[in-house]
Each structure stands twice: as C-alpha cells, then as structure tokens.
C-alpha cells in the first residue's frame, strides 16, 4: 500500500505529515488540506503562503507520486505535546488566476488563443500541455468583464468543450487541456485492477486494492436545442440540436431549449449543442470506487474488472478522486495543548490505511464533458463608451451604419478602429431602405446596452453630451430651443439645422441648409403664413443668385387679395408666352420706359380704348404700313401743324394753311358737281396748254 508519505515546503524544513486530504476533479482546481507538525522554532507563516508545497508518497517500492501546488492559506492550530500543529491549504498554480480580475477586449481569437495569452501574461505558458484534437472557431469579439481570469477562461473552455486536469508526473505541475478520448492515457505505473470486495473489511494488510465499485444512474435530458439570430442573414434559421437519449424510460426525449445560443453561424452552434448534450449525457452513468490504489489519477484511464454492476464495461476514465493520507493510522491523537485552535481534518474512523482514495469514473468509450458550472457574466444596465476610428477621420462606419467604440474601462485599446468590432447603432425608426439615420461620429460619447446582458454583444442605443461635446444651443439660457443641428465634415465650420423655439410669444422654426437644398412634394403643397384672426404674417425671400421656377403641367395663379405688388428688376426681364396673354387692369396703368420700346406682333393687333387716348412723341413719329391704313372717326379727323390743318368731318374736308401746295407728277384731277376756284387777290392758272371750257 502507499506509505512513507512526506511533505516539502520551499522555505521551511523538517515538517512531519500528520494527515492530508487531497481533492481533485476534472475541470476543477484541486485542493489539498494538510496538517503537519514542526518540532523546531515556530514556523513563520509568511515562508509558507504563496510558496510551493508538495506531498510525496510511495506508490510501489520504486515509484513515487507527488501532489504539487502552492500554499494559499496557512494557520497555526496550536500545540500537541511539544510540537506545533499547522494546517495549510494547497492549490495548483492555476488557482492564482482566481486572484486576478480584469476588464479587457479580445478580438478575432479562438478560446485556445485567449487561454494561452492570459497564461502567458502570467508566466504560466510553459506549464501547459495541449492534448487537443479539435479545431476551434474564432471569436470576433470576446470581453472579459469584471471577472477573474480563472472564471473568464473557464467559461470559454466550457462553452467550446475544452476541459482540463493536472499532471504532476516528472516532478512538474502541468495543466493538461483536453477535448476528447484521445486526450487521455492509461494511469502511470499500473492501470489495471480487480475489485476485491473482501479486502475492504477492517484489514490492514491490503496492497493496491479496489474495495468496490458502486454504480449510479440518473435521469438526463435527451435533447439539447439552441437557436440564435444573425442580423446579416435575418431569415436564416440558426436552430441546431443534438440528441443523446439515455435509459429505457418514456421521457428520454425531453428537450432543453435555449435562446440565444451565443453564436452567429450554424457550425459554431452545433459545437455548443454537442458540448451541452455530452455534458448532460455524462451524468447518466457513473461509478464510485474506493481503495488503496495510490496512482488513481484524474484525467487518466483505468481498467477495472471483477465487478458485476458495470454492465460489461471494464475501461473507465477517472473524473474525480479524493485522497486520504495519514502518517499514523489508528493511533491516538497527541495530547492537546491549552492553546490549540481549529478543528482537525475529518477521516473515517474505520480508515486504518496510510492511504485511501475514493474516486468516480465514467465509461471511457462514451463522450465525456464535465458540467458547465461557470456563470456567463451579464451586464444588466447600460454603459457609455466613445466612438473611435482611424486617425484623421471624423466619421467611420460600414454599410449597416455600425461604429467602432472603446469602453472607458478598456486600458489596452488605442482609441482607434481596432478598439472593437463593428457595433450596431440603434435608430428610432428603420425599414427596408427607409427610416432614420444618424451615424455616431468619432469622439462622441454613446450609450451602450448588451443583448441579453451578453458582454460580447454590445449595441449603441443613444448618444450623450459631455464637457467636450456640448449641446448646440447654450443651456439653460436657451432651454426653450430644440432641434437638429449637424456639423459639416470634414473640418466642421458649417451645419444643417432645423431648430424650434418654443418661448411664448417668440415661437420660431429655423431651417438652414449649409449648401444645397432640394424639396420634393409629390402631390399638393400648401403654405399658410399668418392667421386671419391673429398676425397677418409676412414672407420675405432673399435669393443671392438665380431663381428658376418651372411649372410642367397645369396652370399658375397668382393673387394679391388686398394690397399692391411691386417688382424691381435691376437689369433685364424676358417674358416668353407660348400662346395668349390676357391682362386686366381694374383702374389705371402707368408704364414708364427709360429708353427705347420695341413691340413686334406676328399677325394682327387690336387696341380698344373706352374713352380718350393720348399719344405724345417728343421728337418724331414714324409709321410704316406694308399695305393699307384705314382711320375711322365718328365726328372728325383733325391734323394740325402750327397754323396749318386738315379737318375731315361729315361736312367735308377743310385744308387750312398759309400756303397749300398740291403737286401731281403726272395728272391732277379735281372733280365735283360744282367746283369753285377763287383767289381773293390773285388766281393764276398756268400750264404749257391750258383749256377752259
């Protein structure tokens, strides 16, 4: 049987083992509680705490076994006779990861990458043996949030189906990462044993015995189903399931369904479902054994025969073991001194062995996964972060309007586009190519919430002002103002704005377009300025350059109901009318032209004047008619030039003037029933030939 156990501490000598209990289990931090004596000067506990400690025992005449670790707690229990009694708790080096706590971001790394990175940072990477046969997907965004390094790597490994155990062979303390049957080898020294039920009854001559192997079976869930959602493939069904029905009862198909499954792709979900199902199925059938086999080692396989309740199974995987060591089994306790403190380690009174172990095994042929026990951290409330991006950019986004952020607690981020993955930003309204868009800009403080509290799934749900980014309207002086004001990018200095002033009596809506403005009304538009029973209202338009209005179909009506219209044109006006123009003026019309006026009429022109018409020309008037001129007057037509005149009336035509000349180049004929030619002073009839009849 194992005997001659000894203990060793890095900085303390001459320690005598009293008893020890060592507990080890798959994917669990092993724990050794050791009581020992020291006959020398009282032990300085500071030389124990945090320092290496080992228990070594003989397994055979030539083979030894070590339990190794570091002291995490030491106490002085008092005196027994003349010796000081001490107790220490020993843990593996991985336990020190429970003493660290952090908040940090990992991107595009696998679980194995994360584990090795953290262990490497703490100086433990050389103490890891990887017996992994599977490949592991990359995690795009993985947050460690207010949790110990141990809890962080534990939950990642549990999710991916990586478990671990410790190997102390070769005088070193190794952490072995495993993920299946290929990760386990037979126990060192000896790995085949036969159950000897008779050897367990009050015997002190047993050597490497297994007293018995008791079976245990449990009801387990027969199906694990997971589902999740990928916004980049919103209609894709990401449901995955795995079934392992155990037992012969009618409820083996009961299902464990969970959402969200924490994956975006089916292959990853299938891994998670498999791991969850195997962890549940591993609970179905276990065996508990006891004996004095000193090399029972968690994480190794063992062959056990001679037990009727194994259903033919002989090869097992050791998943849990508790080792009991005592220097003087069956001896009476030393006399306790007056100052003894604490309670001794509890041993079975029937245990008369220097060494005894109790262990659990599962069938080696079945897939094994330990239970998932590490809680996934949840962030129930909101956090704030800062939008980040490449140097020199003001806006950094992708086709979904996502942004990069850096949390205030992130000590490793560089406030650039590598600080996070793309993070979705919530909008008040969104649809298929419609909705509202306001991309958070670099430097803005944003409010972040997490899907189902999952640190790996942040969502930007809003933005906040702070001392660096103040509101656009000075507060509280302008507390009645609200609106939307943008900032021109890059460089700023300009903005678009829609502002509302709600101050009583000074209500205002202000709109600004920093450069261009386009307005489309696909049906009707109606603008009312002023109220008839309140302010009449004015409209003032100032256009610094050109104005173009196009009315494609229909009519245009412009009405000034009560008031005048004044138009001032600094230069030219051109008016093109495709067909007719009708102009009605209720009273008078005055038209003043500074220089020239030209009117061209393609066909006819009619002018109708209800009463009088005056035409005044300061210099000359010239009329040219291609064919006829017809002038009709109801009373008379009078042409006057100084003292000369021609008057046409119903009575006749009268020509007056100081001198009247009638000249015909060929012939002049004056004809009437009665013709009178009279000269008061002189009458001259002259011609080359004159005929008077």
Image (cartoon, grey):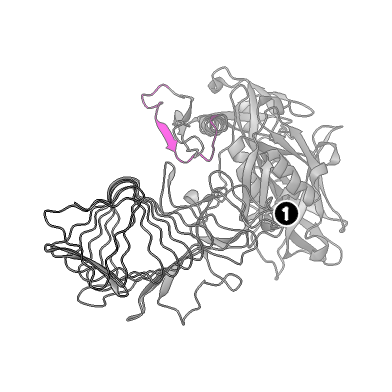
Looking at the image, residue 455 lies above or below residue 216: below
**Residue depicted at 72% across the width and 62% down the height:** 335
**What SS does tag 1 mark?**
helix
How many numbered discs?
1
Residue 225, quarter of the rendered image: top left
Q: Is residue 248 left or right of residue 102?
A: left
Q: Which is more toward the observer, 516 or 636? A: 636
Looking at the image, residue 37 lies above or below residue 374: below
Q: Which residues are magenta?
A: 248-266
**Residue depicted at 77% across the width and 53% down the height:** 70
Residue 27, quarter of the rendered image: top right
Confirm whether the magenta stretch covers residue 594: no
Quadrant of image for the N terminus: top right
**Residue depicted at 47% across the width and 41% down the height:** 260
Q: Which is more toward the observer, 42 or 579? A: 579
Residue labelled with disc 1: 96
Q: Which is more toward the observer, 537 or 446? A: 537
Q: Is residue 589 left or right of residue 166?
A: left
Q: Main secondary structure of the magenta part?
A: loop
| Residue 352 image position (x, y, % from top left) | 68, 42
| Residue 21 image position (x, y, % from top left) | 69, 47
Category of crowding for the residue at label 1, using alpha-carbon neighbours closer than 10 angstroms: few (below 14), some (14–19), many (at least 20)? some
Q: Can residue 600 be seen in this snapshot?
A: yes
Looking at the image, residue 234 lies above or below residue 50: above
| Residue 203 image position (x, y, % from top left) | 67, 34
| Residue 602 image position (x, y, % from top left) | 34, 46
């Amino acid at each position: 049987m194992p005997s001659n156990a000894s203990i060793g501490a890095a900085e303390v000598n001459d320690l005598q083992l009293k008893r020890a209990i060592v507990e080890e289990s798959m994917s669990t931090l092993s724990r050794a509680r050791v009581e020992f004596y020291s006959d020398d000067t009282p032990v300085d506990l500071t030389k124990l705490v945090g320092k290496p400690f080992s228990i070594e025992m003989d397994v055979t005449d030539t083979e030894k076994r070590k339990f190794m670790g570091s002291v995490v707690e030491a106490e002085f229990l008092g005196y027994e006779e003349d010796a000081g009694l001490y107790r220490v708790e020993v843990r593996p080096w991985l336990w020190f990861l429970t003493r660290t706590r952090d908040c940090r971001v990992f991107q595009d790394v696998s679980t194995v990458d994360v584990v090795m990175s953290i262990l490497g940072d703490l100086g433990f990477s050389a103490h890891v043996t990887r017996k992994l046969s599977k490949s592991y997907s990359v995690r795009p965004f993985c947050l460690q949030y207010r949790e110990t390094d141990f809890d962080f790597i534990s939950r990642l490994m549990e999710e991916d189906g990586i478990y671990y155990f410790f190997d102390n062979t070769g005088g070193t303390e190794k952490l072995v990462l495993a993920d299946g049957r290929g990760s386990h080898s037979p126990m060192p020294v000896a790995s085949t044993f036969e159950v000897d039920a008779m050897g367990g009854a009050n015997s002190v001559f047993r050597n490497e015995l297994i007293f018995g192997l008791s079976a245990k079976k449990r009801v387990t869930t027969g199906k694990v189903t997971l589902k999740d959602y990928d916004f980049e493939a919103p209609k894709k069904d990401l449901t995955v399931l795995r079934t392992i029905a155990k037992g012969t009862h009618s409820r083996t198909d009961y299902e464990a369904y969970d959402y969200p499954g924490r994956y975006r792709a089916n292959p990853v979900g299938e891994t998670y479902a498999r791991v969850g199902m195997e962890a549940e199925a591993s609970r179905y059938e276990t065996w508990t054994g006891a004996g004095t086999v000193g090399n029972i080692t968690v994480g190794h396989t063992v062959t056990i025969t001679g037990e009727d309740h194994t259903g033919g199974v002989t090869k097992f995987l050791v998943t849990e073991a508790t080792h009991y060591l005592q220097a003087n089994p069956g001896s009476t306790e030393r006399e306790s001194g007056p100052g003894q403190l604490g309670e001794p380690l509890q041993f079975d009174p029937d245990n008369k062995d220097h060494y005894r172990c109790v262990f659990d095994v599962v069938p080696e042929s079945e897939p094994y996964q330990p239970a998932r026990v590490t809680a996934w951290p949840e962030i129930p409330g909101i956090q704030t972060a800062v939008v980040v991006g490449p140097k020199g950019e003001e806006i950094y986004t992708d086709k979904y309007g996502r942004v990069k952020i850096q949390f205030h607690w992130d000590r490793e981020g560089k406030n650039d586009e590598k600080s996070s993955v793309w993070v979705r930003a919530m909008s008040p309204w969104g649809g298929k190519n419609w909705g509202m868009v306001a991309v958070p800009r670099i430097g803005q403080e944003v409010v972040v919430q997490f899907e189902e509290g999952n640190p790996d799934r942040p969502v930007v749900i809003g933005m906040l002002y702070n001392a660096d980014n103040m509101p656009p309207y000075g507060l509280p002086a302008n507390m009645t103002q609200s609106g939307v004001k943008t900032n021109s990018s890059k460089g700023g200095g300009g903005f678009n704005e829609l502002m509302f002033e709600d101050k009583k009596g000074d209500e205002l809506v202000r709109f600004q377009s920093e450069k261009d403005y386009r307005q489309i009304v696909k049906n009707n538009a109606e603008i009312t300025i002023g109220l008839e029973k309140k302010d009449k209202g004015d409209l003032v338009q100032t256009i610094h350059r050109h104005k173009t209005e196009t009315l494609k179909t229909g009519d245009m009506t412009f009405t000034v109901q009560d008031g005048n219209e004044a138009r001032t044109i600094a230069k030219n006006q051109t008016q093109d009318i495709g067909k007719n123009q009708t102009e009605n003026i209720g009273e008078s019309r005055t038209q003043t032209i500074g220089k020239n006026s030209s009117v061209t009429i393609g066909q006819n022109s009619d002018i109708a004047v209800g009463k009088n018409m005056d035409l005044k020309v300061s210099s000359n008037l010239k009329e040219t008619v291609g064919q006829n001129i017809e002038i009709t007057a109801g009373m008379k037509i009078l042409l006057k030039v100084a003292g000369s005149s021609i008057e046409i009336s119903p009575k006749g035509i009268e020509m007056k003037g100081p001198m009247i000349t009638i000249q015909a180049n060929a012939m002049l004929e004056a004809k009437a029933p009665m013709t009178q030619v009279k000269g008061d002073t002189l009458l001259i009839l002259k011609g080359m030939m004159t005929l008077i009849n």
